[in-house]
Image: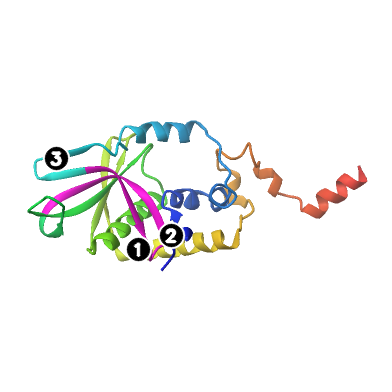
Amino acid sequence: MYSEDDYLMISGIQHFMYSERQWALIHVEQQWAENFQTFSGQELHGRVDDPFIKEKRNDVIISRSLPVSSSKMGMYGICDAVEWHENDGGVPLPNRTKRYLPKVVEYKRGKSKHDHSDELQLVAYTVCLEEMLNCTLSIGELFYFKTRRRDQVEINAELREELSVVVARMHKYFDDGYTPPVNKIDEGKKSSLDQLVPPEIFNRRSARTYIDRRIND
């Protein structure tokens, strides 16, 4: 169990999967810079994340911007949308006579990725809901604005295990105050933080080499 002071942001999973260094700069060193992608993503999410909007479509209730957390995982965040489907095996809701089974729906700016970062973020939100509601959920959905379609994600044992490994490493880095150096994989990746801390600073020469060169100059 984690205390609330040690909770990490679920949204950071995507940063961590893309670049562990980028995640550490944002979440460990508290650095941040806007670029087109981050601004565009916020604009698109702004159309979805309205905590005052609740819809009902047929037998489905839709909640927006639902806060969730998990003390077991040590994570917290806000779901873009949660659909509540009538189901006798679901959970009770306030002021409702029927039972409902929730399904997390996450909205993404681009299209599906080659890694599991989107899926792991979705699973993390789902695990939070399971802990909060004392239930077990088997599916979620990812909606991509670029392709305008939903992809159904099975919340299976493999994704749950992968999430556990990633989250454990995130907590380790955060507790140690560790920022990984740039590696070959990071060199070709764009980051909104590159102007603040250019990747080449961490590459090709050690601190001793830099100091020796400056002294000789």
The amino acid marked with disc number 2 is: Glu
Q: Is residue 43 magenta?
A: no
User: Residue at (20%, 53%) from the top-left corner?
Assistant: 102
Could you say which quadrant of the image residue 110 lies in? top left
What whole-number distance in Å separates the C-alpha atoms at marks 2 and 3? 33 Å
What whole-number distance in Å separates the C-alpha atoms at marks 1 and 3? 30 Å
Q: Which residues are magenta?
A: 63-86
Residue under numbered circle 3: 56
Residue 190, percent across and down?
Answer: 55, 39
Residue 23, percent across and down?
Answer: 53, 50
Q: Earlier in the sequence, mark 2 or mark 3?
A: 2
Could you say which quadrant of the image residue 71 lies in? bottom left
Residue under numbered circle 2: 4
The amino acid marked with disc number 3 is: Lys
Say how many tags the image has: 3
The amino acid marked with disc number 1 is: Arg
Q: Is residue 160 left or right of residue 57?
A: right
**Of circles 1 and 2, which is in front?**
2
Q: Earlier in the sequence, mark 1 or mark 3?
A: 3
User: Residue at (56%, 37%) from the top-left corner?
Assistant: 33
Residue under numbered circle 1: 160
The answer to whether marks 1 and 3 mark residues whose Cβ atoms lie closer than 8 Å is no
What type of secondary structure mainly makes up the magenta span? strand
